[in-house]
Amino acid sequence: MDAFTQEIIAVDDQYYLPSFGRRTPLVIDRGEGCYVYDKSGMQWLDLLGGIAVNVLGHNNEALSAAICEQSKRVIHCSNLYYNEPQAQLAAKLCELTGYDKIFFGNSGAEANEAAIKLARAYFYQKGENRFGIVSANQSFHGRTLATLTATGQSKFHKGFSPLPAGFSTVPINDIEALRAAVTPETCAVMLEPIQGESGVWPLTTDYLQAVRQLCDESGILLIFDEIQSGMGRTGSFLAAEISGVKADITTLAKGLGGGVPIGAILATDECASGFTPGMHGSTFGGNPLACAAALAVLDEYDRLDLMANAKMAGEYLQSALLALAAEGLGIAEVRGAGLMLAFDLTEDKAYALKDELFAKGVLVNSCTPRTIRLLPPLILNTEQVDDFVTILRTCLSAE
Ligand SMILES: Cc1ncc(COP(=O)(O)O)c(C=O)c1O
C-alpha cells in the first residue's frame, strides 16, 4: 500500500463513523469507462459499478456536461415550486414504465420507505385498517427503520429494537407460504424480482404471476423493489417485465442518476391517490440537478442502446462463468440475468477470491462467504469480460 493510501485510510479510521466494513485498501481517485484508478495511476476493472450505480461507467461525457450545465442554471429549488428537469423526468419515466405517477427521493431506502407509506396511506384513505407488509426472507430493502424491518435478514435488525410493527417475511418462490402470511390486516406484498444483496436470487415467473393473482384476489397492493434490478440492468427496463407482471408500486434508485443520488416511486393512479398534499415530502427529492442527471442517463441509454448491451454482455459473461464451472474450477452455481450476476464457489473462499481479484486489478463484491456478485456498468464489452475471465481462471486454478 502506498503512503497516500495509508494516510487517507488513517484519516478515515480516525474520523469516519465505523459503519462500513471497508476491507479493500483502495482510494479511488478517478474513473474512465469501466475502469477506476487510484492516485498513483493503478487501474482496476470495475465489475461492481458502485453497487449497480455507475450504469454509464465513469466520466461519461454527456452526464458530466448535463450536471455542469444544470449546476450553472439552478442546482436546487424547493418543491414548493416547479422545475423543468423534474417535470420532464417524471413524464419520461412514467411513459417508459407505464405508470401514472412518480415521486422522487434521494436514495433506495427513501423510495422504499415512501412505498410502504403509500401502501398504508392508500388503505387509510379507503377507511380500511390494513397496514401489514409481507416481504421475503433474504430480501434487502434499505436501512431506515421501516425498510430494515421489511428486510428479511435478522443481522440488519440487531440493535434497533423496537422495530416498527406490521412486518412479516416468507420464503421466496413459495406461493402457499405467502398465501398463509396474508391476513385481513395486510396492505402490501413487497418483493425484489431478483434479490440482490443476499446473492442474486431470481424469483420465478410462475411465482411472480401467482403473487400478482394473490394480491388481486386479496385486494392488496404489490410493491416491486427494483432499486438494484431495475434501470435496464437485466436487459429490460424493469426486471419484472420479463414475467409480464406489473406491480402497483415500483421503486427505483441506484443507476437512475448515474451516480447522482436520486430515487423514485412509480405508482398507478389508483394507488397514488393514497397521498394527499402534506402526507409525504422531501427537501432534496427531485431537485433539478439530480433530475437533469437522470435525464442525461436515459438519453445515453437510447444513444448507446444500453439495455441491449446489458443483455448481450450479461449473457456472454454468464456463459463464460458457466464454462468455468464446467471446467471444475470451484464454481458451484451461476445466477442472475443481464449484468446482475452472482456465482457461488464450492467452498467458503469468496472473501479470499475477491482479494486476489483486487490484487490482479478487478473489483467485485463478495456478498456472502461463498458468493461473488457482479454489477458492472452497462457499457461493459466482451473484451473486458474476456480479460476478467482470464484473470478469474488464473485465480481459481491457483486454488
Ligand atoms: C433492492 C434494494 N433495495 C433498497 C436498497 C437501499 O438503497 P440505498 O442504499 O440507496 O438506500 C438497496 C441497496 O443496496 C437494494 O439493493
Image: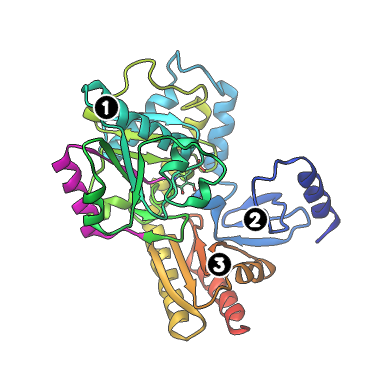
Residue in front for this viewpoint, 283 or 174: 174
Instruction: State left or right for residue 318 relative to residue 290.
Output: left
Describe the element under mark 3 as helix, strand or loop. loop
Q: Residue furthest top?
A: 80
Describe the element under mark 2 as helix, strand or loop. strand
Could you say which disc has been placed on residue 359 in the image?
none
Colour style of the rendered protein structure: rainbow
Residue in front for this viewpoint, 116 or 58: 116
**Distance between the alpha carbons at the discs numbered 3 and 1:** 41 Å
Instruction: State left or right for residue 238 relative to residue 316.
Output: left
Taking the spot 38% from the left edge, 24% from the top edge, the residue there is 87
Q: Residues within 10 Å of mark 3 (few under 14, many from 20)?
A: some
Is disc 3 in contact with disc 1, using a CB cutoff of under 8 Å?
Answer: no
**Where does the image place residue 290, in percent across and percent down from the top left?**
51, 32
Q: Which residues are magenta?
A: 202-227
The residue at label 2 has a CB less than 8 Å from ligand 1: no
| Magenta segment includes 36 | no
Badge 2 is on which residue? 36
Relative to 69, say whether 56 is above or below. Answer: below
- Compare marks 2 and 3 and give the one earlier in the sequence: 2
Tell me the amino acid under the disc marked 2. Val
**Where does the image place residue 94, in percent across and percent down from the top left?**
30, 34
Tell me the amino acid under the disc marked 1. Tyr
Q: Residues within 10 Å of mark 2 (few under 14, many from 20)?
A: many
Badge 3 is on which residue? 369
**Distance between the alpha carbons at the discs numbered 2 and 3:** 25 Å
Describe the element under mark 1 as helix, strand or loop. helix
